[in-house]
Image: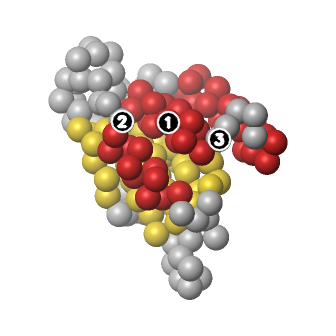
Amino acid sequence: MGVKVYVVFYKPEAEGGYKHWAVCLEVDNEDGSDKEYLIIQANGSQGRFYLDMALKKPEDSSKFIQKAPVFNLCEDAAQQIIETARGLRIRNEDETYNCQDFVMDLLKAIAQEFFDGNDEDNKESIAYYVKQRKKLLRRMDGFA
């Protein structure tokens, strides 16, 4: 059991626009029943983004493209991640800021929250995160 953290990619609202990014928590239930999903995202438009959280499976959206795994964390991580997201500053004053920046900021904050760079037990998880982060950075601002 645990919490899997993914970046989810959605089709843009308008043709030729930016792909929408969100973070998804996939939480295993203790009783082995269906998983629970929480989407954490910056919704809105330029200069008016806001934190949005919704209990839904990303694949249920008609705009879903794919999801990319980033972290596999302990079972009690979900609440900490929610609190981290609530404390994350949404940079509406930055003209180039968008949902993709929010996702990258949140992933960085999660890594700082859960991993100590000198932690031998998490070396593989840290290396995987660094590899995934580099892939995501190459995809930023990607038009559909």
Q: Is residue 132 left or right of residue 66?
A: right
* Other residues around mark 3 within 10 Å, as few (<14) / some (14–19) / many (≥20): some
Per the model, the C-alpha gap separating discs 1 and 3 is 10 Å
Query: Do callouts 1 and 3 mark residues in contact (Cβ within 8 Å)?
Result: no
Residue 90: x and y in percent read: 30, 30
Answer with mark 1 or mark 2, whichever residue precedes in sequence: 2
Q: Is residue 138 left or right of residue 95?
A: right
Q: Which residue is mark 1?
A: 109
Residue 124 appears in the picture as rendered: no
Q: Tag 1, which secondary structure?
A: helix
Q: Nearer the viewer, residue 140 or 82?
A: 82
* Other residues around mark 2 within 10 Å, as few (<14) / some (14–19) / many (≥20): some
Q: Tag 3, which secondary structure?
A: loop
Q: Residue at x 33, y 27 (%)?
A: 98
Q: Amino acid at mark 1?
A: Ala
Residue 113: x and y in percent read: 54, 42
Q: Which mark is residue 115?
A: 3
Q: Amino acid at mark 3?
A: Phe
Please tell me in which quadrant of the rendered image residue 143 appears.
Answer: top left
Q: Quadrant of the C terminus?
A: top left
Q: Which residue is mark 2?
A: 88
Up the image or down, 126 lies above or below 138; here it is below
Residue 42: x and y in percent read: 31, 38
Per the model, the C-alpha gap separating discs 3 and 2 is 18 Å
Q: Quadrant of the N terminus?
A: bottom right
Per the model, the C-alpha gap separating discs 1 and 2 is 8 Å
Residue 139 appears in the picture as rendered: yes
* Other residues around mark 1 within 10 Å, as few (<14) / some (14–19) / many (≥20): some
Query: Do callouts 1 and 2 mark residues in contact (Cβ within 8 Å)?
Result: yes
Please tell me in which quadrant of the rendered image residue 75 appears.
Answer: bottom right
